[in-house]
Image (cartoon, rainbow, N blue to C red):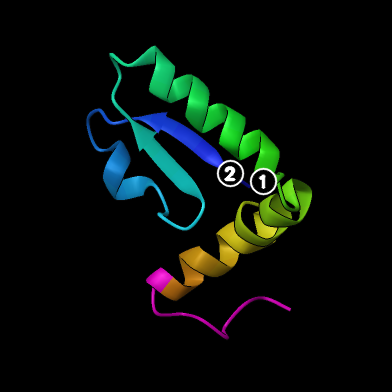
Amino acid sequence: MRVVAARVGGVASALCPATGRLVAPEDPAARAAALRDALAEGGGDPRGFVLRAASLAAAAATYLDLAGLAGHGAG
């Protein structure tokens, strides 16, 4: 999934360089060009991305991993 975001606040640290592009917030021409490029490249598999990265199961696995309890799920 391609992301176009303004270079403000902490956005740069949260954006994956492989899929995202930062543009100056005061440069609408750069934003338009980045959006055109993202649309031309295609969006990959947004549903698959959400299922892998943001589903309830993925969130639970991340939480257990952060808590040091990976592999201890209630199964």
**Residue 71 forms part of the magenta stretch:** yes
The answer to which image quadrant residue 11 occupies is top left
Q: Which residues are magenta?
A: 66-75
Indicate whether 69 appears above or below 38: below
The answer to whether residue 60 is magenta is no
Q: Residues within 10 Å of mark 1 (few under 14, many from 20)?
A: few
Q: Give the mark nearer the N terminus: 1 vs 2.
A: 2
Q: Secondary structure at mark 1?
A: helix
Real-space Cα separation, disc 1 to disc 2, in angstroms: 8 Å
| Residue at mark 1 | 41
User: Is residue 62 placed above or below 59 in the rendered structure?
Assistant: below
Inspect the image, locate mark 1, and give the three-letter code of the amino acid beneath it. Answer: Glu
| Of the pair 55 and 44, the residue shown nearer to us | 44
Under circle 2, the secondary element is loop
- In the image, what residue occupies the spot 39% across and 70% down? 66
**Which residue is under mark 2?**
2
Q: CB atoms at circles 1 and 2 under 8 Å apart?
A: yes
Give the quadrant of residue 22: top left
- Chief secondary structure of the magenta span? loop
Question: Of all residues shown, which one is farthest toward the bottom?
Answer: 71
In the image, residue 52 above or below residue 3: below
